[in-house]
Amino acid sequence: MPKMSETSSSSSAPSNGPIQNQGVQEITVAESEAAADCLALAFADDEVAMYFVKTDDTGDWSKEEKWKMHVRIMHSIVEAHCLKGLALTIGPNYDCVALWMPPGKNMDDRLIMFRSGMWVINQKLLSEGQSRFQEEFMPLLHQTKEEVLGSLDNNSWYLVYIGTKPDSRGKGYAKQLIEYVTRQADDQGLVCYLESSNEVNPKFYRKLGFETEKKIHLIRGPKPVEMEVMVRKPIPKMSSSEVPAEYRAARASETN
C-alpha cells in the first residue's frame, strides 16, 4: 500500500513511543500496534476499510465497538506484513505507514494468518462482514491482480496499504515511502501495483509513475464502492552518455 540514505532499523523503538530517526524505517512486530493506529486514523472514513465493519448486521454495535474492530483488523494486517511482507514508516511517531508485499510473496500462508491473528478477525466479523471479505473482496482483488498483471503477477511489488495521520499530511511522507520501494523496483526491472479506494489519490500516484488500468467495484453494500487499479512500469536508469549535455552542465554548475 517512498530509497533514502537515512534509512535505518527501528527495532529498538518502543511499540508505543516516538521514533527517534525520522527517515524511512522498517516496522517490527513489536511496533505493529503503533503502526496500526496510524492506518486506523488514516482510513477512518474509507469506504473499503470499513466495508466489513459497517454492515446491516452490525447495526446494534456501538461506535466504540466498530472502531475497536477497525483497529484490530489494521493491527493484524500490519503484523502480517511485518512477518511476511515489508512494513515501512516515516515521521517521529509512525506518522505515515506503508505495507508492501514483495515479489513472490503473498498472504496465503496459514502460519502467517495464525501468527498475525487474521483468522481471529474473520471469526469476530459477523456473517455479512465475513461474506464480504471471503466471497467478494479477496476473490475480486486476487482475480483482478492476476488479470491485470498476467505473468508478472508473482514478480511484482504490491502496495497493499499506505496511510498518513491526518495531522501529518502535506509533509511528503507518503511520497518517500512509495519511492523507497519504486527505486528498488526500477533497479530490479519490476512493476508496482496498487488499488486506490480514494478518488483523490490517483492523481498523486500518477505523479509517481502509476497509471490506471481499470476500475473495480464492491457491490454487496447499499451502494457500489469503487477502487482504481493502478500499475507502475519500471523506469530504466539512463547511462551517463544518455543524459542530455545541457542537463549534465546544469548539474555540474550546481555542485561547483
Image: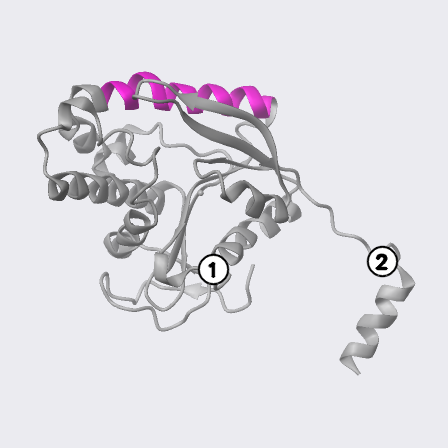
Rendered image: mark on residue 173: 1
Count the marks: 2
- Coloring basis for residues: one colour
* Badge 1 vs badge 2, beta-carbon distance below 8 Å: no
In which quadrant will I find the C terminus? bottom right
Amino acid tagged 2: Val
Q: In the figure, 98 relative to 138: above or below?
A: below
- Is the N terminus in the top left, top right, bottom left or bottom right quadrant? top left
Vertically, is 168 above or below 113? Answer: below
Q: Residue at x 22, y 31 (%)?
A: 54
Of 31 and 72, which appears nearest the observer?
72
Residue 182 colored in magenta in the image: no
Answer left or right for 227 relative to 127.
right
What's the amino acid at mark 1?
Answer: Tyr
Q: Secondary structure at mark 1?
A: helix
Q: Position of residue 105 (x, y in %)?
A: 44, 34
Disc 2 is placed on an element classified as loop
Query: Tag on residue 243?
Result: 2
- Rendering quarter of residue 230: top right
Residue appearing at x 32%, y 62% in the figure: 11
Give the mark nearer the N terminus: 1 vs 2: 1
Measure how far apart labels 1 and 2 are at the Cα level.
29 Å
200 horizontally vs 151: left or right: left
Where are the magenta residues, as a range?
130-150
